[in-house]
Image (spheres, helix red, strand yellow):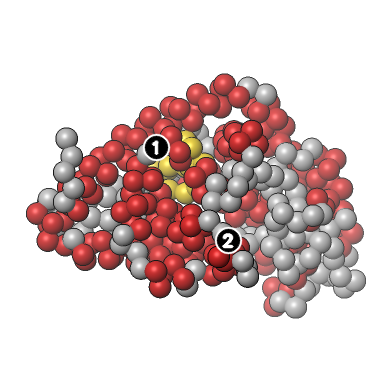
Amino acid sequence: MAAVADRVFSGVQPTGNLHLGNYLGAIKRFVALQESHECIYCVVDLHAITVWQDPVELKRHIREVTAAFIACGIDPKAHIVFNQSQVSGHAELAWIFNCVARMGWLNRMTQFKEKAGKDRENVSVGLFAYPDLMAADILLYRATHVPVGEDQKQHLELTRDIAQKFNTDFAASIAEHGHADGYFPLTEPLIAGPATRVMSLRDGAKKMSKSDPSDFSRINLTDDRDTIASKVRKAKTDPEPLPTEEEGLKTRPEADNLVGIFAALSDRTKADVLADYGNAQFSAFKAALVDLAVEKLGPIGAEMQRLMAEPAAIDAILIDGADRARVIADQTIAEVKDIVGLVRG
């Protein structure tokens, strides 16, 4: 059986403080893809526990990501929204992929090196092996496309390597079970938009992050309108007016970041924004960006607060989504077990 055409899978970790970077780099694109693809969006809570999480906070963060999905415009009835740990196929397929992937592949993962730092001997095995789980997340649904940021592109390449090796290692069995063109698709990345990598409002050379000690480095999705306005006004800039051409942004990281944010929030290109604001002082540009950010993000924060006040309703969405995801996942796991040669009832 061929993979479903144009099926999108993606996930967001529930580690707290979703911010503008998460919205522009991921969730906003998730919403747009609903119009053209069958979409499965997952709160990847098993990924979150590769480092220790407070159990009470983890539950709250799982619900917060779900609330963000809904508040931003994802339709959990037309598409599937669930949390990863409710579908056991993710863990089952990850183990099979642990036996397909090579140690050398995982050793090359730059994000593990960054997260582990110099203390690699003391990090969890899960942190080292989680790219295999990420591959399982995607291939469990035989997804054809994944919207990813630049920092996740290497992991998607690993997913493709795992799919290819599985298809090659088990080619004869795959054919015997009626899958003439291989079993797993070679999933394609969807990397697009003017702000796929949103930088800190305090330092244009650093990615916007929830771990930054300064709350003014990011706009949180739960920030109210006044807080959003204050953070934009205080964002770091330089003394020169905005350039008239994109080339002029290359040596000005803070200007480039703010123009990129404006472009992404307004669904325009950086060139379009500079056509309107080139030669303008930052005071005028920031005033326009404040109005735009408040208009786009203010309602999201308000709706998230409303949804978070009803945790039972959020849980019902996750349970329904998990039930629907499990139908697809169980079929994949059954077929993979048959291909590998495992006996099942």
Circle 1 — which element? loop
211 and 3: which is toward the camera: 211
Q: Residue at x 43, y 62 (%)?
A: 156
Q: Which amino acid does the dot numbered 1 rest on? A: Val
Q: For the C terminus, which image quadrant?
A: top left
Q: Which residue is mark 2?
A: 122
Q: Categorize mark 2 by other alpha carbons within 10 Å: few (<14), some (14-19), many (20+).
A: few
Q: Quadrant of residue 297?
A: top right
Q: Amino acid at mark 2?
A: Asn
* Relative side of 176 to 8, left or right: left
Specify whether residue 145 is in view: no
Look at mark 1 in the image and give the residue it sits on: 87
Give how far apart the Cα atoms at labels 2 and 1 are. Answer: 29 Å
In what element is the residue under mark 2?
helix
Residue at image point 90% right, 71% down:
239
> Farthest residue toward the left?
176
Percent coordinates x, y for residue 322 in the rendering: 41, 33
Position in image of residue 226 (x %, y %): 85, 40
Could you tell me residue 12's position as x and y percent?
Answer: 55, 47
Which x, y percent locates residue 44?
50, 45
